[in-house]
Image (cartoon, rainbow, N blue to C red):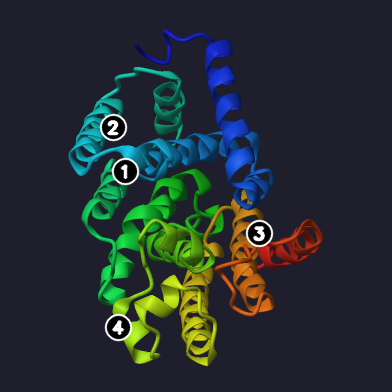
Amino acid sequence: MSIAASSSADLESAYEACRVETAEWAKTFYLGTLLLPFAKRKAIWAIYVWCRRTDELMDSQEAQSKSVNELSDRLDRWEEKTRALFSGQVRDDLDMVMLDTLQRYPQDIQPYLDMIEGQRMDLSWTRYPTFEDLQLYCYRVAGTVGLMTQGVMGVDDAYTSAPWSECPDPSDAAVALGIANQLTNILRDVGEDRERGRIYLPQEDLRNFGVSEDDLMAGKINEAWIELMMFQLARAREWFVRSEAGVRWLSADARWPVWTSLRLYRGILVAIERNNYDVFNQRAYVGKLSKALELPRCFVSSQSR
């Protein structure tokens, strides 16, 4: 089925379903998308839902009861479906909006395949020996999102208007923002992940700061844990700083929402500090007032290149 064969009403209904799902499951991210022009925000909602569907293959409640072989087969079928999508085949409403998005904002299939590989890592990895191992995982499950969305965001015409201008490549910054967001997720969700038998904090860091797995599993908050968390938060902030360099290259209508998304997500790190690094009993989040106060600040930041 092609987009041309689908009615405009069906397509808009499918996009609306993506909007509703994004608003329900990614409130901070959704707020940032509302600052985009309507065509771009629809594309971002579609990409978000594709990523969520990919994540649910491994992380949904229903998936927890599946065997490794069953989950592996799921990922194989999802990869086949994704390859079919990029060849123009539409099997459901999500494919419909994704194909429309790909036609409006052409992009490569590789980030999508890399994200599926990130899900495959969760089949066999429950511990990460080094930060380099974790960085690869973060790239695959989140850095790829930056690559998927950078074509939608676009580059400011000011950088390409002169005959001698070279179009800047925001790819590294886009990947850095995805990694920063995923590191933030990991720090926020330490308590939830331990209940599933997963520890994403690098084993080398646990050893260096004298935190045992038993301490982590018990939710023990002591001086060693606080020092470990301070180190992890500083590292996540470094990745946010890396990402900032690329925001100035984005098209004018994308800089404000990206700045907003970046600063609001980085605010989760502040919330973890405010909770005295207790990620076992308290969920860190950015409150509505803080979000409202950040909007004008982000707008000012977005006006400079």
Left or right side of 1 for 23: right
Residue at the spot of label 4:
204
Is 236 placed above or below 26 here?
A: below
> In the image shown, does 138 or 84 lie closer to the viewer?
138
Mark 3 or mark 4, earlier in chain: 4
Q: Which residue is drawn at 49% across and 59% down?
A: 192
- Which mark identifies residue 112? 1
Asked if disc 1 and disc 2 are in contact, CB closer than 8 Å, the reply is yes
Q: Which amino acid does label 4 sit on?
A: Glu
Mark 1 or mark 2, earlier in chain: 2
For the residues labelled 2 and 4, the Cα–Cα distance comes to: 36 Å
Q: Is mark 4 on a helix, strand or loop?
A: helix
On the image, the x and y values in percent for residue 128 come to 28, 70
Q: What element carries label 1?
A: helix
Is 236 placed above or below 155 here?
A: below
- Which mark identifies residue 12? none
Is 237 placed above or below 261 here?
A: below
Q: In which quarter of the image is residue 41?
A: top right
Q: Which of marks 2 and 3 is in front?
A: 2
Q: Which amino acid does label 3 sit on?
A: Thr
Left or right side of 37 for 224: left
> Which image quarter is the N terminus in?
top left
Q: Which of marks 2 and 4 is in front?
A: 4
Mark 1 or mark 4, earlier in chain: 1
Asked if disc 3 and disc 1 are in contact, CB closer than 8 Å, the reply is no
Q: What element carries label 2?
A: helix
Residue at the spot of label 3:
260
Mark 2 or mark 3, earlier in chain: 2
Mark 2 or mark 4, earlier in chain: 2
For the residues labelled 1 and 2, the Cα–Cα distance comes to: 8 Å
